[in-house]
Amino acid sequence: MPTPALPFPLPFPLPAEDRALSPHTGWTRAHWEAAADGLLAAVRPYASPGQARIDLPGPRPSWSGPASDGLEGYARTFLLAAFRTAGARGADPAGLLERYAAGLAAGTDPASGEGWPEITDRGQPMVEAASIALALRLTRRWLWERLDQPVRLRAARWLAAALHREPVDNNWHLFPLTVAGFLAELATTDPGLPEAAGADPATCAAAVARGLAKLDGWYLGEGWYTDGRPRAVDHYNGWALHLYPVLHAHLSGDAALLARYGPRLAQHLDGYARTFGGDGAPLHQGRSLIYRHAAAAPLWLGALTGHTPLDPGTTRRLASGALRHFLDRGAVDAEGLLPLGWYGAHPPMVQHYSGPASPYWSSKGFLGLLLPADHPVWTATEQPAPAERADAVVPLAAPGWLVQSTAADGLVRVHNHGSDDQPATGEPLPDDPLYARCAHSTATGPSFTPELPDNHFALTLDGTPTARGRITPLGTGPGWAASVSTPAEGLRITSLTLAHGPDEVRAHLVGGATPGTPARQTGWAVTTPDLHSVLHPVHGYAALTHHHLPGGTAYGPAATLPVLDGTVTDGLFVCTARLGAAADGPPPSVTVTGYALHVRWPDGTSHRAELGDGAVAVTAPSGAVGAAGTASVPGAVGQP
């Protein structure tokens, strides 16, 4: 589906569309350059006198405080400036590098009045050090090598502290790796400088090794990582866990390292490319979604390193579609700044660690500018996104996802039976709406109204709906995914999603609940009249109602939510669901016999499935590729 014309005027100009080269988005490399220039020009008025801080306006500071936020503004926009100038082979008519060089000198000089906060254990400056180090690495010929030696030593010392401090136990381990990559490189041009800064070759090598060892421990397989916790699968896969090690290997010319991590990136992109909607939207799932078009970073990285299953025209179509999606919908305000939200500002989705400059981690989405103008990724004709080519339901076993897309409306839905962002041990945390939902999409966001969570199955205990809690994947297969959750002591819910075309069947088997316990299934929260969310009861439910969510979602200020209510009898609950531009059309036919389901989809295809306590058995749909699936968790009883 072609990206619609701009509904939101931008405060900076873009070139005319080129629909011959880019029939889906109209965008070319020149549009990316103009967008980068516009975003960088907009932050200039907020630079401190010495250029070491960019203090952007916002509703509140991050939990790290204004000094750290100002550093963040410098570091994250410096990364964008680095992609812009390095991609132009040092051409810098706007004088970007001169200003960032001045900021580097002032920020590392305590006497300047603009000195940066020190890098401490688990402190935000460690994050920003990685962006600064990567930007310096990319622009070394045009910035670093023109600095005075005292400035180089101060900067190297400030950065080197990252190698001697403790990161948060997640993707943060890749920040010392990134800093070490730059400092180790200096040994060839600045003999003795890394050692004087506390970053001798052994220290740098150890930081890289530590980061990679952590990364390997988080690898789930098939190109997917978890971000520290056992099952925290989200966009950090692309814009951090693949980005930093693969780009480091590429910049280092380390063929062995690239051969180790590049194929993982290619595997990741094979599934990840399916999570972009036909309107360019990335999947709305996981934390830090204010980084928006940073979702394009792994697409460009695959093209840059040659580790991608995507042809150049598809890569550019996905990446340009993502950036244009946000610019078309108000993600840049009237001053040219990126607010804390998805389109415009949306405070409920913003984490406490984010401040006014945090959205500029989206600079990573401009990594494609490192590719020269004559690279096929810029010269090939755009090709359709996977979601635009044909209806598809694709299981991704490693994250426990079932990706369902429909070509007519370009919508992508991801049925989540594997990502919960829960700690490994101890009491489960309260559900995070951005992880715990049974489904996420490219056109809807979660409700942050605690009593009305979207895409959620709950029992009502003492007047309160149960959380989903920890998720144990049971498996995925052709048209299905399943999991078990334990929302309360003595309760276990076995959940199964079947999908075909635009339709879904959602089934839950409750174990351990008292008969008569209230149960509730919610659907997709929609914010526009041209998008429909439908639920039909099949078994266990008595009433369908529609509720208004006054807080809306990231997609709009008001949302409606279909809700099915019932009570526990035999423990089985089954309904059909649909999210799409069309509300009409017959739902699938579902016959329930005991705990077995026979689903006949509107096109005549069928599924058979049976649920047990902690177990499922699914027969692949007629005409599907793949065998029947059976899965259970240890200790399950009543297995099918």
Image (tube, rainbow, N blue to C red):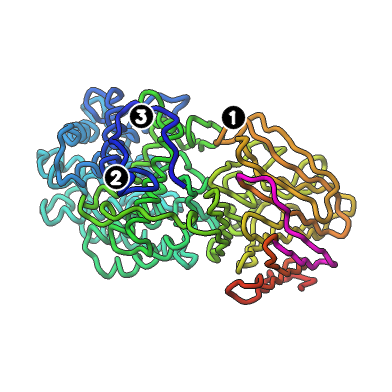
Element type where label 1 sits in the image:
loop
Per the model, the C-alpha gap separating discs 3 and 1 is 32 Å
Tell us which disc is closer to us: 3 or 2: 2
Magenta-tinted stretch: 581-601
Helix, strand or loop at label 3? It is helix
In the picture, the disc for residue 67 is: 3
* Between discs 3 and 1, the one toward the N terminus: 3
**Residue 71 image position (x, y, % from top left):** 32, 34
* Circle 2 residue: 28
Where residue 537 appears, x then y in whole percent?
A: 79, 51
The disc labelled 1 sits on which kind of residue? Pro
- Queried whether the magenta region covers residue 515, the answer comes back as no
Distance from the alpha carbon under mark 3 to that under mark 2: 37 Å
Task: Specify the quadrant that holds the C terminus.
Answer: bottom right
Label 1 belongs to which residue? 557
Q: Which quadrant of the structure image shows residue 64?
A: top left
Q: Is residue 21 above or below residue 103?
A: below
Across and down, in percent, residue 107 comes to 24, 33
Q: In the image, 200: left or right of 356?
A: left
Residue at figure coordinates x 70%, y 68% from the top left: 607
Q: Nearer the viewer, residue 531 or 223?
A: 531
Q: Residues within 10 Å of mark 2 (few under 14, many from 20)?
A: many
Q: Which kind of residue does numbered mark 2 sit on?
A: Thr
State whether residue 490 is above or below residue 137: below
Is there any visible trace of residue 211 in the rendered image? yes
